[in-house]
Image (spheres, rainbow, N blue to C red):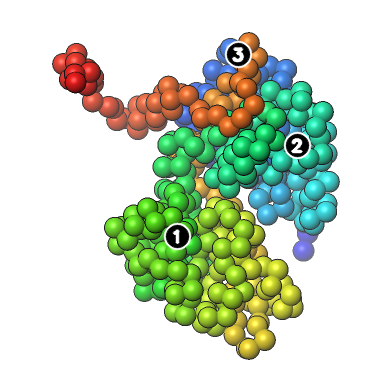
Amino acid sequence: MSQTSPVELAMAGRGRIDWASRSMPALQQALQRLLEQGSVAGMRIGISLVLEPKTANLVIGLQQAGAQVAVFAPPDCTDVEVIAALEERRIAVFSDPAANEAENLELARAFLRTNPQILVDDGAWVTRLAHREFPQLVESMLGATEETTSGVRPLRVMEEQGELKIPVIAVNDSPLKYLFDNVYGTGQSCVMALLDLTNLQIAGRRVLVIGYGWVGKGVAQHATALGALVSVAEIDPIKALQAQHDGHRVCSVQAAAPDCEVVFAATGIAGVLTAEHLASMPSGVILCTAGGGDFELPMTFLRAQGEPRNLRDHIDEYQLDDGRAVIVVADGHCINCTGGEGNPIEIMDLSLALQACAIETLARTTEPLVPGVHRIARDIETQIAAQRLAHAGASTEPLTPALEAALRDW
């Protein structure tokens, strides 16, 4: 069988990138502003996000606005067609779907050696690597942005301990991100990725969602809508109570283990599902990660059981000593990114528009932010939301003088 040539890969990648761009008006407007104002012209910007067609539109737009852009993505979050399309545009891409852990680390180091002034990160992995191994680079950086809950958490710990040396804009903390990307986007795409990869029905299946943050809420909502019987495990009493009010059974992982058929780990925290939990689960239980990484699942234990049997693309079966089988989807990595094409285009339009605006904020060297985790400006959020509403032919209720007076009355 002949291999696909780089030219063919790039052509396919261009087509998918162009298709995504058709439904990303908010991002295109933000990038157009960067181009017209010259905000990032000549700047070195490093993009460390899931590398797929939607992200590629941010990368290409920054290049067109005059930035020198380099891209990194771990092997489970990259797309060869997109890589080829970006390299065709002479954009440096440090990503290899076949890279092992050591090779991926070297790619990340090479990416940081491009000396980005602004870093766009996902999971804060590269930001933390820069702080550990490239202190001189960190001293020269204008700052970074962070895309995910699993990245904001360690950054806040670094800030509390005085270890965060740069300003980081937490894009994830914007309602435009967590209410849309996490609930509607990740919730839908993770459940649909499971169905696409397994070709199974979720209706009537007992599904355990670990964590009822925005991602867990979205996964539970979409699974329930398709007929699943959802249980939620959550350490926060307030979130657990919300899950109960949303109609889900709320209990511990251990209590749900004996009859659960599908598990979505949706916390971004290591070790939330353990080998001890697996001991109580039925044979054939399906394990997935939604929004985080394989560190949420007991992958070290499972891999110690021997090589898994590959049942179909992205579906592996591990045999335990007692004869039971455990099925892992996407090797335990984030199911919608590794086994699917990520969140819907319209959802990522909002998140990536926020990223472009966060980059613009950091690029304003006349008003530098102090080191720490920062929230994106409220007026930026409302502007992006208004743009998307207008694009959809919708509008908000006008604020009349009478309403404004009523709002100010005490």
Give the residue pinned by disc 1: 234
Q: Secondary structure at mark 1?
A: loop
The quadrant in which residue 160 appears is top right
Quarter the N terminus occupies: bottom right
Residue toward you, 381 or 62:
381
Q: Position of residue 31 (x, y in %)?
A: 56, 23
Report the Cα–Cα distance between label 2 and label 1. Answer: 32 Å
Give the residue pinned by disc 3: 367
- Residue 14: tell me if it is visible: no
Report the Cα–Cα distance between label 3 and label 2. Answer: 23 Å
Q: Is residue 136 left or right of residue 245?
A: right
Quarter the C terminus occupies: top left
Looking at numbered disc 1 in the image, what kind of residue is underneath it? Glu
Q: In the image as oriented, which residue stretches furthest toward the front?
A: 161
Find out whether the residues at labels 2 and 1 contact each other: C-beta distance under 8 Å. no
Give the residue pinned by disc 2: 131
Looking at numbered disc 3 in the image, what kind of residue is underneath it? Glu
